Image (cartoon, rainbow, N blue to C red):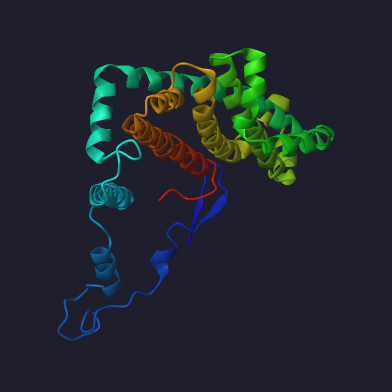
Amino acid sequence: MTFRENADGVGQVSLQQAGRGRPRSRRPGGAGGGRGVPGIEMGDSVATAAMPRFPRLWAALKFVAPLLFLVLLWEVVVKAFGVEPRIFPSVEAVAGAGLETMQDGTLVRHIGASLWRVAVGTSLAIAVSVPLGVAMGLSPAVSIFLTPLFRFFSVLAGIAWIPIATLWFGYGFGAITFVIFNAVFFVVAYNTLLGVSRIPMALRQAAASLGAGGWAMLTQVILPGALPNIVTGVRTGLGFAWRGLIAAEMIATNVGLGYMLFLARDFYRTEVIVFGMIVIGILWLLIDRLLLAPLERATIERWGMVDRA
């Protein structure tokens, strides 16, 4: 534990270096005597030996290894039991279908359409849900009135809105965007409410006593304090939206990853169906691992919830 002063001269206690003050056990014969090498510590040597040289690469390998095992098992089972391609394709057939869709440009077109719908629907949902969640968190009357409605609608799956969305907006971009909007809106609004309500009242009162007006209170206390919950809500809502997107595209459009799966079904092209499923899974992993998870981690670290490693 260390003590330091900030720019205002106020002392702060940090637990980040808490391990430095502990007595460390040494090798027999170390600095305490014997034939060991002086100064070599057992704890440090064991930790160094157990720690991978490239931790990120090691984590990636641990994540990919089960997937590679699944592909190997898939190939062995299909060939060993002679599974009909119309029932389930081989790895080679799926790879060939993927190469075909990339060469003729259909894969890029389907991916672009799906990602654009997700981006628009999510952006609209965040723009509406965050102010509403903040208002619910700041006003008990608004919260009491809207919380039961949010609890009711938040349990409705995004795909439940598809029939009525097609009636309201027709088949196409509007209906699918509406489904994505609903999948993200309620989750983000409710998480924003939770984030605002968890800000200590003493912190708000301290900011007000220092002369913080309404705008300063909102931008320097309320939104920063609720931001970790907001980002968590966005990440959760996008997971729901991604599933709702694929389901809606099977029904309400003629372009997109969901439509690609549905069209391949009509022609019994199981290799295209499986390839599309793989693309959908990989895209979500990339969005979650490379964008959402780092954003959530950085937000939590930025606002003092945990120490940066």
Q: Residue at x 39, y 23 (%)?
A: 111
Question: Would residue 88 appear left or right of 215 to someone viewing this image?
Answer: left
**Which percent across, then down, holds residue 279?**
36, 32
Q: Residue at x 41, y 28 (%)?
A: 265
Above or below, 200 relative to 283 = below
Question: Would residue 80 appear left or right of 291 to someone viewing this image?
Answer: left
Residue 212 in view here: no
Residue nearer the viewer, 299 or 243 = 243
**Which percent across, then down, holds residue 48?**
25, 64
The quadrant where residue 133 appears? top right
Above or below, 82 relative to 196 = below
Above or below, 111 relative to 50 = above
**Which percent across, then down, holds residue 212?**
70, 30
Query: Which residue is the extreme one toward the bottom?
Result: 34
Question: Would residue 296 appear left or right of 143 to someone viewing this image?
Answer: left
**Which percent across, then down, holds residue 82?**
26, 47
Residue nearer the viewer, 97 or 60 = 97
The quadrant where residue 201 appears? top right
Residue nearer the viewer, 108 or 159 = 159
The quadrant where residue 49 appears? bottom left
Residue nearer the viewer, 144 or 303 = 144
Q: Residue at x 63, y 38 (%)?
A: 226
Residue 266 in view here: yes
Above or below, 46 relative to 183 = below
Total marks shown come to: 0
